[in-house]
Amino acid sequence: MCNQHGQETLSASAGKALIPWMMLMPFLLAFVLFFVLPALQTLQLSFTDSGLTETHGYVGLANYVELLQDPDFWYAMLHTGYFSLLTVVPLTALGLVMAMLINRLSYFASTVQAIFFIPNILPIAVMAMISSWMLHPTFGVVNLVAGSQIAWFNDPDFAMQMVALATIWWTVGFNVLLFLAALKNIPQDLYEAAGLDGATRWGTFRYITWRQLRPVTLMVFGLQLVASLKIFGQTYLLTGGGPFDSTKVVLHYMYETGFVNQNAGYASAIAVTFVVIILLILLLQSLFSHFINRRS
């Protein structure tokens, strides 16, 4: 009798353990089919001199050796890093500041929040059209206000900065939402206790708000870092990589190599190398976040 009861309990436990795996199975299958297998095929292609529509023989590490000596790839890496420098910190800081200001509003907070978030739901093509119109050399609002006729997206001194500015306007609303959600979760008891102790506004922000928001800030910083390193659509639509390749980023260079020059093997080597570089950067960012959290 005891053995039968034990077997029934064991079967029930095994059934409960299988339920999560059965619910995850569709996602796991899709992940393997649409991510793992294509990634492995890209890795395989990187060791060949295959074209876009034909497969050639293996060339070993020749593509990677050529890539390390390719100045165009490293210029594209430099442009990608410059764009990340122009966007990651400003997007994180602006999201935090705007969320704190909206959080202090007594009226129309939801309306203001929606206004800042609306650009984020626009398709990238619409964003590119609006940005091109705003910065048009003859009819653009920016030039009308400044009294100038600068072709912002065609000037190598301004093109990348303008792409970064358009990206900040387009995506900052998402960070505002993340920071607002974190601000709403800070217990009000902490602020009341600080007020009774006579804490200043700066002290309240430093020892309560900032400490409570630090994990979210590190998460937003990491998300922005990945998004900025993966930039392609903005430069492709707004500048086409120009002028004089001053805004050509890594993914744009990979796209041209694979789909325009039809060199799939070399383009795959660019993709694999770029993924490794991103993973190394994320590892450093994760170690930095772990260090900050341990110190706090």
Image (cartoon, rainbow, N blue to C red):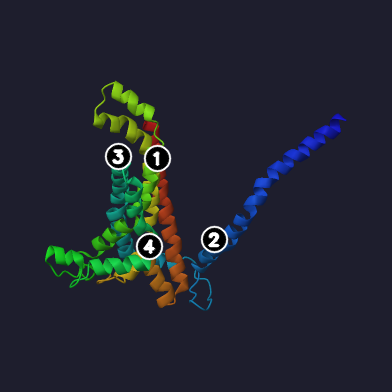
Q: Tags 3 and 4 in contact by the CB under 8 Å rule?
A: no
**Looking at numbered disc 4 in the image, what kind of residue is underneath it?**
Leu
* Number of other residues with Cα within 10 Å of mark 2, as a class: few under 14, some 14 to 19, many 20 or more: few
Q: Do we see residue 293 in this rendering?
A: yes
Q: Which mark is residue 35?
A: 2
The residue that label 1 is drawn on is: 182
User: Residue 153: percent from the left, percent from the top?
Assistant: 24, 68
* Number of other residues with Cα within 10 Å of mark 1, as a class: few under 14, some 14 to 19, many 20 or more: some
Label 1 to label 2, Cα distance in Å?
32 Å
In what element is the residue under mark 3? loop
Front: mark 4 or 2: 4
Q: Residue furthest front?
A: 107
**Looking at numbered disc 1 in the image, what kind of residue is underneath it?**
Ala
In what element is the residue under mark 1? helix
Label 1 to label 4, Cα distance in Å?
25 Å
User: Residue 259: percent from the left, percent from the top?
Assistant: 43, 75
Q: Tags 1 and 2 in contact by the CB under 8 Å rule?
A: no
Q: Quick check: 157 left or right of 166?
A: left
Compared to residue 23, the image places residue 48 above or below, namely below
The residue that label 3 is drawn on is: 104
Q: Tags 3 and 1 in contact by the CB under 8 Å rule?
A: no
Label 3 to label 2, Cα distance in Å?
43 Å
Task: Point out the tag, 1 or 4, that comes first from the N-terminus.
Answer: 4
Of 17 and 255, the residue lying toward us: 17
Label 4 to label 2, Cα distance in Å?
26 Å
Label 3 to label 1, Cα distance in Å?
14 Å
The residue that label 4 is drawn on is: 122
Q: Do we see residue 72 in this rendering?
A: no
Identity of the residue drawn at 21% across and 64% down: 158
Of 210 and 228, the residue lying toward us: 210
Q: Quick check: 243 left or right of 255?
A: left
